[in-house]
Amino acid sequence: MSQELTAALKKSLKGKLVLPADAEYDAARKVFNGMIDKYPAAIAQVANVQDVIATVNFARENNLLLAVRCGGHSVPGFGTCDGGLVIDLSLLKAIEVNAEAKTVRVGGGCLLKEVDAVTHEIGMAVPFGFYGGTGVGGLTLGGGLGYLTRKYGLSIDNLLEADVVLADGSVVKASASENPDLFWALRGGGGNFGVVVSFLFRLHPVHTVYGGLMLWDWEDSKEIMKWYNGLMTTGSNALNGFFVLMIVPPGDPFPQHLHNKKVCGIVWCYSGDMNLAEEVFAPIRAFKKTVLDFTGPMSFPVIQTMFDQMYTPGMYHYWKPLFVKNLDDVSIDTYIKQGQAMPTLMSSMHIYPVNGAAAQIAKDATAWSYRDAKYVVIILGIDTDPGKTKPISEWTREYWNALLPYGSGGAYVNFESDEGFDTVKTTYGGSYERLSQIKAKYDPGNLFRVNQNIKPA
């Protein structure tokens, strides 16, 4: 970008254009994953939709690599790029609740915790993810798995419409009645089709939930996994929880005798009748003696941000996911054997249920087509030391390869690392060709390619 080009873009923006010479550049270029260390030529901190249009047009007209960032939580670092232009949506924070219609309109730069705080005031919530610092945009466009998935579906199942800036600079609405092909693609197809500047979501009555973390001895892992599988496949959709193999961090709120111990656990979230919560959890508590029980009633925003302080920005992450249809004795043995080799304190393995309400949606209704999968499994190699990036990456890949025979094909796109075209095509499976055709219609030049990229047909 020449000085003339930079000056022209800066003049066209109401927001701020951050350049490498600016004092705030280093902070502005950082994203959640410390492994990602990229140097964009400029970062457009857009203030409104017109800024987004101007930046998209500028990137297209000058053949610049373009990345779009909401919360910067993408583990492969798709919210930034080397030598190109970044659209930073973080100033687009408008949140408008319509209590009568039970909807909320959300600006493209909002984080989950920001929306939760507003909707909580009227005792409602959108089914979002597990980490409050995640951007609404990235989470939703990739599917939106969370604590309410079994009861109310994925985030995309509660998306009613979206306002999108396309590659040609035009602004369109995508919904069931307007540009329905684009609406279908946005629900799982990632950021391939444009910049979503606002989302309209359906709200659900969720205020207080009963949940939190339970831990058991490592030796109980197989028994707990089999029992957990039964609960998640036959129990009430109001009961959700993700299973974890982990090492207990040394420090509060964990008791000292558990520090640095390998354990298995479940993070529960019951969103049913709170008058029945203790009754629901009585057999859970009676099944096997826990080594820690941090469960009880809490507001939904509290459980949504429960792990925000544990996984702070700047840690080094390498993740690999897969979909699975079942947990049987043979696969459970593999989960535990590979988990035993966790290389660092922060590394872990999680199993998230995606059945219940999410499974009631037709397989071809959205670009997320894995409606028959029961679980999303993710292996998370994480550490604070840059010197540990090799061991966490190797452990994650070895674990994933060992589990691959038990997978059902494909993976949750929001948990994928940057593994290239073949992996993307496999991830979308039978939806890929349709997505490719829609990509050719709305972004024929593949301007939006810093993502899990779907190539235009």
Image: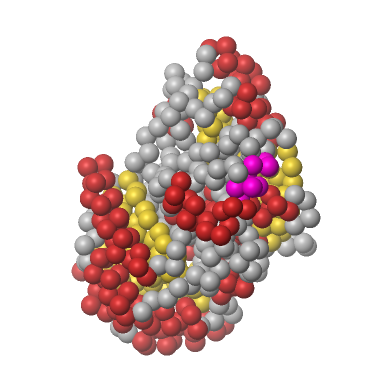
| Residue 297 place in picture, x, y as percent | 49, 73
Q: Quadrant of residue 248?
A: bottom left
| Observer-nearest of 197 and 5 | 5
Q: Is residue 29 a member of the stretch shown in magenta?
A: no
Based on the picture, tell me whether residue 438 belongs to the magenta stretch: yes
Dominant secondary structure (helix, strand or loop) of the stretch shown in magenta: helix
Q: In this view, does 3 lie to the left or right of 326?
A: right
**Which residues make up the magenta segment?**
435-442
**Rendered residue at 52%/56% (across/down):** 428
Give the x, y percent position of residue 152: 61, 69
* Image vertical order of residue 216 relative to residue 5, above or below: below
Is residue 215 rendered to the left or right of residue 60?
A: left
**Across the whole image, how many numbered discs are drawn on residues?**
0
In this rendering, the answer to whether 350 lies above or below 35 is below
Q: In this view, does 390 lie to the left or right of 62?
A: left
Residue 357 higher or lower than 432, as above or below: below
Left or right: residue 438 compared with residue 36: right
Q: Quadrant of the C terminus?
A: top right
The residue located at (32%, 80%) in the rendering is 329
Picture coordinates of residue 216, whole percent (x, y)? 29, 76
